[in-house]
Amino acid sequence: MFGKWAGFKAADLLERCVGHPLQFDPNIGLLYAEPRASLEMLAAELGQSPRVIYENLLSFFSGYKAPPRDDRPCGAAEVESVLCKYKSMRGGHYRVAKDINEVRHALQGWGTTATKLLGHLPPGRERLAMR
């Protein structure tokens, strides 16, 4: 009922949140409808091919560590998420830092463990949503 993307997202969560070692196809951002649509939108605006834009994004984000463990460079799974969020933002369905703000709000007042989790959220991101 959820489609092929749900299998990828479940694997993504297992890899990042549970620590189950997985390696994703480096072309994952080209395979699913939403990230591919984001790439096609950018390609039309920039006059470049979706593949070139995707390769540039992979290269750029590989300079950052993948949260939450920072144990490897960001890769295809993270770029897939960036592309999906970007398309949602451009369509008016997502604002920068929306997820962080929601998690921060939901963890308020739930005790010691929740307070520790709050300490792991990226600092200062809540101000981005106000712009």
Image (tube, rainbow, N blue to C red):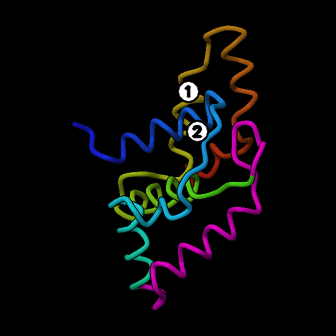
Name which residue lies at 77% across and 62% down. Answer: 63
Question: Residue 73's image quarter?
Answer: bottom right
Q: Name the residue carrying label 2.
A: 100
Left or right side of 102 for 40: left
Instruction: Residue 105: say if magenta.
Output: no
For residue 97, above or below residue 119? below
For residue 17, above or below residue 59? above
Q: Name the residue carrying label 1.
A: 105
Question: Residue 89's image quarter?
Answer: bottom left
Q: Given this view, does label 2 or label 1 mark the residue nearer the observer?
A: 2
- Percent x, y of residue 124: 72, 44
| Part of the protein shown in magenta | 45-72
Mark 2 or mark 1: name the one nearer the start of the chain. 2
Q: CB of mark 2 within 8 Å of CB of mark 1?
A: no
- Which quarter of the figure is the N terminus placed in? top left
Dot 2 alpha-carbon crowd within 10 angstroms: few under 14, some 14 to 19, many 20 or more? some
